[in-house]
Image (cartoon, rainbow, N blue to C red):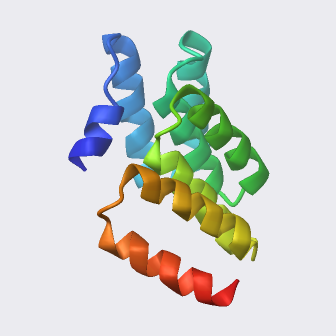
Amino acid sequence: QELSALWHQHADSKLARLVQQGVRFLEDEAFADALPIFKQILRLDPKYPEAWHLLGACHFLDDQYKEAIQCYKTCLALEPRHIGAMSGMASIYFILNEDRIALQWLLRIQKVTPLNSELQDQISMTSEFV
């Protein structure tokens, strides 16, 4: 949660408040309310990786996987080590039964967090099935 709070920070206090509002809507599963907030943030700052991640999460949680993938890709183009976006990509590909692609995303996460034992277990289990 602490890392997540760091990602949600923005130098512009207005955008920071919008992010907090959008995250609250996400937590309440009010995706229709969260979506325009994240889009508004991106109109104001299209190079803000966390806004792309949050928009992707909004789409992901609303089962709009194609849109989520595009948002996560944009986030990763801006911040290649964004674990949340990589994790979202892995989750989507698991849901789509594309385990090989999901495994590739898990391996990318491992490069950023090599000491994560839960991730290592997930990689080992997934490797057995692909």
Position of residue 118 relative to residue 19, above or below, is: below
- Residue under the image location 53 percent in, 20 percent down: 41
Q: Looking at the rendering, which quadrant does residue 63 occupy?
A: bottom right
- Residue under the image location 35 percent in, 32 percent down: 8
Residue 72 drawn at (x, y percent): 62, 42
Work out whether residue 61 can be spotted: no
- Residue under the image location 41 percent in, 49 percent down: 112
Pick whichever, 19 or 130, lies toward us: 130
Residue projecting furthest to the bottom: 128
Residue 43 drawn at (x, y percent): 62, 15
As drawn, is 69 to the left or to the right of 53? right
Residue 26 drawn at (x, y percent): 46, 48
Position of residue 99 relative to residue 18, above or below, is: below
Residue 9 drawn at (x, y percent): 31, 26
Quarter of the image with the C terminus is: bottom right
Residue projecting furthest to the left: 2
How many labels sit on residues? 0
Work out whether residue 103 can be spotted: yes
Q: Looking at the rendering, which quadrant does residue 114 occupy?
A: bottom left
Q: Looking at the rendering, which quadrant does residue 126 occupy?
A: bottom right
Pick whichever, 27 or 92, lies toward us: 92
- Residue under the image location 54 percent in, 47 percent down: 85
As drawn, is 12 to the left or to the right of 46? left
Pick whichever, 21 or 112, lies toward us: 112
Pick whichever, 70 or 76, lies toward us: 76
Position of residue 80 relative to residue 121, above or below, is: above
As drawn, is 58 to the left or to the right of 98? left
